[in-house]
Amino acid sequence: MPPSEPAAVFDYTLDNGLKVILLEDHTAPLISMWTWYRVGSRNELPGRTGISHWVEHMQFKGTPTLAKGQIFRDVSRHGGVLNAMTSYDWTAYYETLPADQVELAITIESDRMVHSLYDPAETESERTVILSERQGAENRPTYLLYEKLLSTAFRHHPYGHPILGSEHDLKAISRADLYDHYRLFYHPANAFVVMVGDFVAVEMLARLDRAFGPIKTGPIPNLTRAIEPDQVGERRVLLRRPAPTSYLQVAYDGPAATSPDVPAMLMADAILSGGKGLGFGGGGGLGRSSRLYKSLVSSGLARGAGSGFDLYHDPFLMTIAVTALPDSEPPRIESILDREIELLRSVDVAEDELRRAQKQMKAQYTYSSEGVTNQAFRLGQMEIVDSYGRAESLLADIERVTAADIRHVANRYLDDANRSVGWLVPTEPGSGSIESAYPDATLVHDEQRFGQWPVTGSVASASPPNRQSFERTVLANGMTLLGQVRPRSPSVDLRIRLDAGAVRDPDDKVGLASFTARALQRGTHSHTFDSLNTMTDSLGASLGVDAGRNQTEIVMRCLAEDLPEMAKLAADVIRRPIFPAEEIKKVRHQILSGIREADNDTGSQAARAFRQLVFPSPHRYGRRIAGELDTVETISRTDLAAFHARAYGPRRAIVAAVGGIGSLNHVAGLLESHFGDWDTSNEPAPAIHYPVPPPASAERRATIPGKSQADIVLGLATIARNHPSYYALDTANLILGRLGLMGRLGATVRDQDGMAYFATSQLQPEIVGSIWLSRAGVDPKNIDRAIDGMLAQLRLIRREPVTTDELDDAKSFLIGVLPIALESNGGVAASLINLERFELGLDYLDRYPGIIGQLTREELLHAMATLLDPDVVAIGIAGPPAA
């Protein structure tokens, strides 16, 4: 059954001015409702920066009929997900829920459109949360650079304001300021609703009219708009701070979303760095045949290089970002970038390059149309900046773009006099060349079991029946294939998981598995790195390889029509890499740069300190997957080839294929054709044993200069995934640190105490034993208080049973959220891989509601009390030096 034609979008404006946009999608029993407000940082005045984002936070603090925390609780307990976000032009709130719970979303959004409370105490508590969020952003060097670049590019227009706001303004904004902003912008005439999902449009309109129709509207805000004058010369900013390498960001003044130049600008962006998704979703890994990747990354000068052109209400920017490798000279990188821009301005794009970029845009459009949440976001985003109809027509406009069109917009917008250039360079000695090269830059010193299955090439008849139509077969060489046919899906997600993870690394070659995975695509017997990238980009497909602790996973995404070609290519990459010496040198350089960046990241360093305490040397789980600077330096081409020979093979390999695959037999045939003669002599991985729990708690701190926020990771090793108490432990942890707004931890450490932007916990399952951990990002002065608060909640849930309501909510969420988790091809493929790995059976999702439904409060209490001891937790902390 071929993919159906796009359904018609229905729109109507209520009497009070609220526009409603509806799209029926009966693929799954789900709805996604988005409520959009035409207010963002674009609507903020000096002294009030960040107020729109703060109002977004306050909208979860309750109304006279919705108690604080109830919005998250109600949506979660009915198996839904929700969030909100603020951009330059808009603020949006969404709920994705089972279709029979649509009234809940309607009630929430109609109520908080006019009845939010803005309690003064809640305002002050949230102030510290907002400041913590900003501190966390400041920990990322690229955030600070982008903030400075925006204020340089926009000297008059409020697009130059940071969405999070300045620290000074955040400390000064009052409850009255917030409430006035809310009343000015939150009303029907300044809002619209988008809903996509399993409903009848006419009936849904009536329900929306009953809820929103009585709301009185207000005047459309008519704030004076600052117009950014045409730029008449290049502007520069230089930021010097502790950093592992140099970062370049360039911003060219571009057109507004309604400009006829938009399709050509999107294509120019695709030529520079690959096609991007139009909205949520999209496929990663595209653009490795693009100009910036080839000239800066493939050449060995940069760890990453990309561009972006996003759609905004007013003229915005075409941006380019480069992460330099540590020994690359900034002037050389900028010179190469200038050359690529000039080439785009002076020479027409070749026909094959044009078609390749257009295929990427078509594929990205398809990928980002997957699921009701993605579709609703795209319609709303387009309605904000243009009209929702552009969500469909824009792709056709892109397909009509010519080489002459691209050259035209490149000459109009990508001009040196029309750009702002920002560099962030490390403060370590030897990094001063940028200043001598650009003496006029503004210098800124401101400181993120089964049984045995039949070995056959056809679908195993012994597979247990299941409502999801999951299928399973085992190929003659031992590869296990699982799949789900989705006839209406125009794309395919395919994952291959091999028993080739970092646990295999020799003691003196830590990082070998990761290095091997990253080097696989650098050349095969049939393809060079460049030809492989050209092929995948020509198909609008992505192919990625990533090593974890226990496995290496190959993730592929393509249009259904291209599955045979991509399966052949994947086999070539996995089975026949040649590890060219020059490419290995480049990969090594990138890995070393990545390690240095991780060493400069508080989250990474806190997690590393925690893991080293839980798994002390020489335990293989205590190592960094990427390796260390000294071990990666010693890994040779011979080491890579030898690791590949002994670790890569079909034994214990798991494959999942989901989407428009036709049939599982079709995929099995492709795998038999390309993997059937694969050598089955790959060695088993070494056995892993979990350590004996320590006698007492331990703490390790890492200091990183130039940071604003500290990260905390605390936890311990616990039971394996197949332990009888696993479900009770997982459900109790959901209540502790995940349910709603990060569970009890979020309600106390974040919301009540205002000490952190996030405070959460998770259970990471493994075959031989799992990891329980809790994380928080806090102001450095609150480290000890936050740890005390996190451990207090752990002790409480071990001492007293959870409430009946908490358990009921957790059960409802775990059972109800399954349709959302299985909405995307990629989500199903990942689930199938884990069903096989943990030996759960194809009917597991049918059995799961019964497993969860029978859990008791006493079982949760017993699991927490016996399996998580707060007196033996490991605590990893990373942050700035003590003041």
Image (cartoon, rainbow, N blue to C red):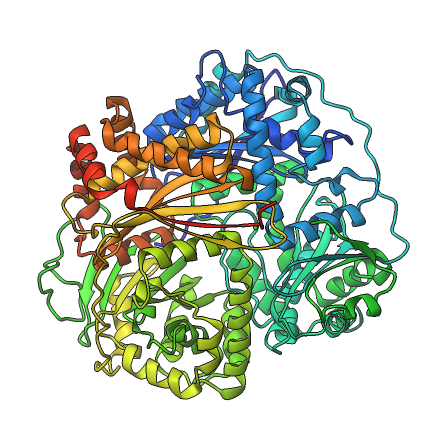
> Based on the displayed image, in which of its 4 quarters is residue 555 positioned?
bottom left
Q: Residue at x 31, y 72 (%)?
A: 500
Quick check: 240 left or right of 485? right
Q: Provide residue 203's location: percent of width, then percent of height.
A: 43, 23
Q: Provide residue 875's location: percent of width, then percent of height.
A: 39, 48
Q: Provide residue 570's location: percent of width, then percent of height.
A: 39, 74
Q: Provide residue 675's location: percent of width, then percent of height.
A: 28, 78
- The one nearer the camera, 818 or 31, is 818
Q: Residue furthest right?
A: 232
Quadrant of the image for the C terminus? top right
Quick check: 318 left or right of 735? right
Q: Residue at x 55, y 66 (%)?
A: 596
- The one nearer the camera, 849 or 404, is 849
- The one nearer the camera, 221 or 268, is 221
Quick check: 632 left or right of 708? left
- The one nearer the camera, 94 or 487, is 94
When the figure is inspected, residue 684 is found, relative to residue 263, above or below; the finding is below
Quadrant of the image for the N terminus? bottom left
Q: Residue at x 37, y 38 (%)?
A: 26
Q: Is residue 367 visible?
A: no
